[in-house]
Image (spheres, grey):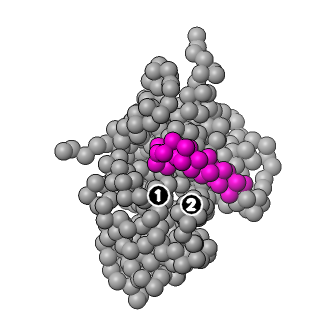
Amino acid sequence: MPQKSAYEIAVEQFDNTLPYLHLDPGVAEIMRAPKREMTVRFPVQMDDGTIRVFTGYRVQHSTAAGPAKGGIRFHPNVTLDEVKALAMWMTWKCAVVDLPFGGAKGGVVCNPKEMSLRETENLTRRFTTEISGIIGPMADVPAPDVNTNSQTMAWVMDTYAMHTGIQSSAIVTGKPIELGGSQGRTEATGRGVMISALAALQAKGIPIQGARVAVQGFGNVGAISAYLLQDQGAIVVAVSDSRGGIWNPNGLDVRDVLRYKAETGSVVGYPNTEAISNGDVLIVDCDVLVPAALEGAIHAGNAGQIKAQVIVEGANGPTTPEADEILNGNGRLLIPDILANAGGVTVSYFEWVQDLQSFFWSEAQVNARLQQYMSSAFDQVYAISQREQVSMRTAAYIKAISRVAKAIQLRGLYP
């Protein structure tokens, strides 16, 4: 049986929620597909003087609740299908946390690891030029994603200003602090995962002190959520990156593993650990599992082997619908991506608000507001799951889709 694409999974998750809602079929049809899909092909001069043509995408799934919001990724495997799925998930992610945004996503098919800084800047500026007609502080606000960062956003912001003459720091989020970035943004997604994990453990009646945690994907989200959970008293027993995993049932010193990875390029080989595969991290004996790598990591083939009572999705789309059914049948409490990793877009919203008013908050204020937003969203979704006797994913979709549908109905149709 052929594997489903990311967009097929996103639509299936949407369709699976419709029986719990009493939506006008026309309103459902509006939300099932993106509002706008842009494909661009653009030339970039490389350092050796040759010209390469790149393909890029920007997809706006919905703007019913507000400006579109979503990251830009640079990766060799970027496809329009993937970008459409991520844009749809962004719509639900913003809605589930009650942010006044719709969902968008962008990407360029390239391998920045094989490009110089100048080539990456030229690519970023040219891609920004190509999509500049549909982005803007009140239209579509990009952010960093896979292989992009605060420097990338600085280039996007500057390029937009050169074309429009508008010096608006609110055009992108995830910027450097010096250009209007927000305190607390670097840790935001990982902190949101930690907040979700603590709430889920409480719901399950598992004390955080001594709770064993495994994290697949030791990048920004995975590593930060790991050391923040460790700070709360959890024991991190396994982590992995693209080269492999490490396991120590007595626990790892997460910040020291982070130091080791910075020095060697991988967690593999960290002293006093047993080498395990990336896949094995998912099935180690633990209480909390954080899949923070790529889509489809948990599938029908391995879901039945997962021992964790709580799964908190740090990545986007790490669990297939078939795996969802298995995990739910086994009594696992899975906190879906659109809730669990919404910390990043929530602090992006805070950054956007600070930029619009040119008034900035302390890191303590940002973290306190993040805690408030994430905890409130978790409580609302958990209440729906208990009331409707459905999984947390279905409950999150019920909340998110209802909110977007209401926005569409209130706005009406033009003309």
The numbered dot on residue 272 is none
Name the residue nearer the viewer: 250 or 74. Answer: 250
Residue 199 placement: quadrant: bottom right
Task: Indicate the position of residue 357 as horizontal and vertical percent values.
Answer: 79, 43
Residue matched to label 2:
203
Is 143 on the left-hand or right-hand side of 322? right
Magenta run includes residue 55 = no
Kindly identify the amino acid type of the residue bearing the numbered disc 2: Ala
Instruction: Determine crowd level at label 2: few under 14, some 14-19, many 20+ residues with C-alpha closer than 10 A.
Output: few
**Image quadrant for the C terminus?**
top right
Magenta run includes residue 391 = yes
| Residue range (magenta) | 369-395
Task: Indicate the position of residue 166 as horizontal and vertical percent values.
Answer: 70, 36
Residue matched to label 1:
333
Kindly identify the amino acid type of the residue bearing the numbered disc 1: Leu
Q: Residue at x 50, y 54 (%)?
A: 335
Q: Residue at x 42, y 75 (%)?
A: 238
Q: Are marks 2 and 1 in contact (CB under 8 Å)?
A: yes
Is label 1 in a helix, a strand or a loop? strand
